[in-house]
Image (cartoon, grey):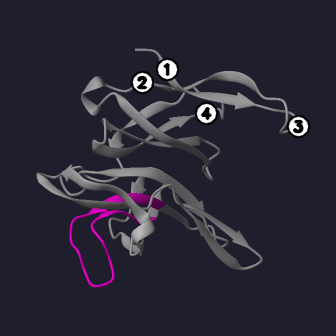
Amino acid sequence: LGKIFPLLQSADFVQWQFASNALVRPALEFGTHFWAPEVAEGDDGKFYLYYSVGHEDKDHQLRVAVSESAQGPYFDSGKTLIDPRECPFAIDAHPFQDTDGQWYMFYATDFLDITREHFRGTALVVDRMTSMTTLEGNPRVVMRAKHAWQLFKKDRDMYGKIADWYTLEGPTVVNRHGKYFLFYS
């Protein structure tokens, strides 16, 4: 099965060299498509690699792997961050530690409803982390697609329906001089 997610290292942010592959591949039953790894160092000195795994563009779940070293190897913790029966598609995990030390998990997930202000599609949510491997389970919407330019695919076949699909994904949060900035694609 091997390891996935190449790690690069640099002494000057200009020259980069391959360091290793990070994640020891988890069980094939989770899927063969891996997306958007991100590493955070926990308060316990361990390193946590958050990633999504699934089948092509369906059934993706957020998982976490742990290592004693930033360069790995990372081993899957054996649990998903969100129950796939409650949330059949979650990607792009971004752990963020606030100035008070509290950790939050930003990620992208699907919304099938349409409102006056929002389109159907993938949107951004945040949940409080109760540990580096557990979410509180109370996700809150950060942003949903509401502009025509956010169209990912017209007439997309998703969840047994053909509909226009709008997408926001890849959340990253930065706190700069007391202001929070959310970057996304």
For residue 12, what is the image quadrant?
Answer: top right
Task: Give the residue pinned by disc 4.
Answer: 68
- The magenta-colored residue range is 106-128
Lower sequence index among marks 1 and 2? 1
Crowd around label 2: few <14 · some 14–19 · many ≥20 (10 Å): some
Name the residue beneath numbered marker 2. Answer: 25
- Mark 1 residue element: strand
Considering the whole magenta stretch, tell me its main secondary structure: strand
Marked residue nearer the N-terminal end (1 or 3): 1
Secondary structure state at the residue bearing disc 3: loop
Amino acid residing under circle 1: Lys
- Observer-nearest of 52 and 26: 52
Q: Mark 2 or mark 4: name the one nearer the start of the chain.
A: 2
Whether tag 1 and tag 2 are in contact, CB under 8 A, the answer is yes
Residue at point 70%, 22% (across, down): 18
In front here: 164 or 174? 164
The residue where tag 3 is placed is 12
Q: Amino acid at mark 3?
A: Asp
Can you tell which of label 1 and label 3 is closer to the viewer? 3
The disc, 3 or 2, on the residue closer to the chain's N-terminal end is: 3
Q: Which residue is mark 1?
A: 3
